[in-house]
Structures are given as C-alpha cells and as structure tokens.
Amino acid sequence: MASFDVIVIGAGPGGYVCAIRCAQLGLKTAVVEARETLGGTCLNVGCIPSKALLNATHHLHEVHENFEKMGLMGATPTVDWAKMQAYKQDVVNGNTKGIEFLFKKNKITWLKGFGSIPEAGKVKVGDEVHEAKSIVIATGSEPASLPGVTVDEKTVVTSTGALSLESIPATMVVIGAGVIGLEMGSVYARLGTKVTVVEYLDAILPGMDGEVVKSFHKILAKQGLSFVMGAAVEAVTVEGGKAKVGYKLKKDGKAATIEADAVLVATGRRPFTEGLGLETLGVEMLPRGMVKIDGHFQTSVPGVYAIGDCVTGPMLAHKAEDEGMAVAEVLAGKHGHVNYGVIPGVVYTTPEVASVGVTEEMLKEQGRAYKVGKFPFMGNARAKAVFQAEGFVKLLADKETDRILGCHIIGPGAGDLIHEVCVAMEFGASAQDLALTCHAHPTYSEAVREAALACGDGAIHA
C-alpha cells in the first residue's frame, strides 16, 4: 500500500493538469489511468486527433479551391487515407508522450488500471489499495447514444470510430448538429463524402448566438453539407455494410429514411463514473449521472472531490483544466477559483466559430439594456487576402457602463481571436478599452477592434 496526499482518478485534461498543479504545490500525487497512454479522451480520441484531420482536410480544400487563384499550378493531390491516419496518430503520440514526460518531471506516480473508491481516503487499483488524504474524480465522459441506435464503431460510429474509419465513405449521416457532428462532418465533406446532418432541434449549435448560427448554417451548406432539421431519429439499421437512418419530422410527423455508408452518432456525451463505487460510498449524484459538488469541488463525502465532464457545466477540456488547477489550489490550502462566465467555446471548422459570455438572446431574456458592435470580415484586408472573408465579429456590451458582456465570432482564427475578449472580460474591460487598444495591421484581430469601435461612434472600415 502506497500513501499519497492526492490521488487523481483519470488522466484527461482535468486530471493530468490537476495532478501537475498539485505536484507543483508540494503535494505527493498519483494518477489512476487504465489507458495505455495518458491524456484521456481529448488527446487520444477527441480534441487532438480531430484537429489533425481538420487541418489535413483544410489543406486539401485549399488545394482544390484556392491554389489556382493564387497562381499555384500543378496536379492536385490525391488522398492517401492510411497516411493521413498515420499523421493523425503521430500527432496523438507526440502529445501523450509529452504528458508522460511532464509526469516524470513533476514526480507524479502513474497507477495503471481502473480505479475505485472502497471508502473515503482509499483508492483501489487492481488488487492494490492506496491511501490518500484527498481523492479527485476526473473520469470525464463518454459518447451518448439514442434509443433504437446500436453503435458498432464500424458502420454506426461515435466520434471515436469516426476518427478511424477503414475507408472514406461515399455517404455519411451525422446525427446531431453540435460541435462534434459539424467538425467531423466537415472533415468527411472535404474528403468528398456526401454528408447529411440530421438534427432534432430547429437550429444547429444549440445555445450559440442566433445570428452566428444562421450565418454558419448557410456557410456549411455552401460547403456541401446537407441538413434535415427538426427531425427525430427513431432507428438505425445495418445490412450488408449499409446503414438506414429512419427519422420523423416534428412539424408534420412525416417519416423518411436515408441510406448511408456510415452513420456518426454525435448526440452529446454523458459522465463516465461507472465502476467507481460512488453509490456504495454515498456520493450524492445529480440527474443525468453527474456528481454533485459544492463551491470547493468537494462531493458529499469529505475528502472526495470531482471536476470536469462528470460535474455540471460545459463539457470542455479547458473548463476541466481550470477546475483541475482550482481544486489543486484548494487542496494545498489556497483559494481555487473558476470564472464560469468567461469560458470560451470554439468550433474548429473553416471558418471557425467562437463565443464567450452571454448571447443576445440571453440578454433579451434578462431584459438587460445592451448594445451591439458588429464588423464583417469582408472589411478585413488580411481575411480577404486568404479567401476567408465570410463571417463577422459581434461584440455585446452593457448599454450604460459599456462593459463587455459577450462576444461571438465566425471567421478565420476565431478560436484564437476570442481570447482577446476573454482577457478583456476577466479584467472587467469596456468596449472602449478594446477599441482604444492598438492592433497590428494587417491581422484578423483588427476585426475585433472594429466591432468594439462599432459599440461607440462606429467602425472605421465598415
């Protein structure tokens, strides 16, 4: 039996970041992880491999659509799917090995295997029981499916299977128009797959700014994605390597079927806490399988904490990381804090979509007086130079104080641009503060400044 100050269960972004911060703060730390590699879903079968495929297929799109416009002539490349898969795996391997290096550097013990908590202060891994003053549950989430849909990870796949299909399908149905569905749908559409997205709601990207959603929907349709909105999927059957997706339209009850070579079930994720023994331990749970925690990330059992996808809040790697650092501070006797009002969300398609803070719909619902500053990328010289002038920056500020309340971007580099606004919001900045800050020319970031100017006397280039 080994004894630690902290044992973290799960080595995803929340878990490994928590462990590193704990070690930096002088706590003897161990991490329980059953995978052969560290990094959890994000690094192994989520964020990182999907971005590798998005990057590869974006370059393919540029070759076909824009190279000739720039005078780059020659035979267009073909896709070697096996090599693209190898590239994706190299990216994953480099990142997961990087986490192993960080564990060694910070003297963190990796307890390999599945963990359970037989009682407070103890974690069982295999046949061994280890002691810990504090235990942090960071077990993440798993894909959620639908009734009547059986996933085989070959023809009917989750995001995990979609990353490693044996071949590029001629046709694909994506069930769910959220971030994962649209990102992976974009990957295959660029590879030549005919992609149809079936969504239960009447709009893509639930919860995002309505204006951004409408614009993005049109852009994706221009890129070749087809959409069936307001449709409830009732069954998916597979026969002879082909899948049939049966759905019913909500507006009139009309039933229809789509045939496809592959079906991606992208209907969200659910907390993964199976096998931890939380019920026996007496840990209070919330609906949908989430672990209930207090303001200091502690569960109903003293000494047992939880972070990331298995607690409330957006299921985002960076939210889990922030919580991991915050709970480490708490365990070290400091004051850990997460500002949940400034957690950005990004869709890594082309163009990218990013948002932070409240949407215009939220402000209307609150009855709060606000002003909107908008600027189109069509007025941004850099964006036009690289054929990415679609989209806009939309900044929301309090009507009286001018304090920035939210920002929504659809355009080139949106996932990076949004952080200028995040920093501004963290410091309680006004739109004028942002507008008076010199921005380098020519950069995409000038569009953010112009949107801030539009909250005042008006943008310069619009």
Image (spheres, grey):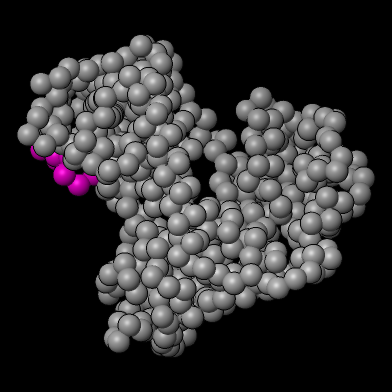
- List x then y, in percent, for residue 61: 66, 66
| 192 versus 313 height, above or below | below
Quarter of image, res 123: top left
The image quadrant where one finds the N terminus is top left
Between 285 and 239, the residue placed more toward the observer is 239
- List x then y, in percent, for residue 252: 47, 85
| 222 versus 379 height, above or below | below
Quarter of image, res 147: bottom left
Q: Residue at x 48, y 47 (%)?
A: 91
Q: Is residue 455 magenta?
A: no
Total numbered labels placed on residues in the image: 0
Most common SS among magenta residues: loop
| 254 versus 414 height, above or below | below
Asked whether the viewer can see residue 403, the reply is yes
Q: Residue at x 39, y 52 (%)?
A: 45
Left or right of 440, for residue 207: left
Between 188 and 353, the residue placed more toward the observer is 188
Quarter of image, res 32: top left
Q: Residue at x 63, y 61 (%)?
A: 58
- List x then y, in percent, for residue 387: 79, 61
Outermost left residue: 127
Q: Which residues are magenta?
A: 273-282
Q: Residue at x 40, y 33 (%)?
A: 99
Left or right of 287, for residue 65: right
Left or right of 445, for residue 427: left
Left or right of 253, for residue 456: right
- List x then y, in percent, for residue 307: 35, 34
Asked whether the viewer can see residue 248, the reply is no
Q: Is residue 278 magenta?
A: yes
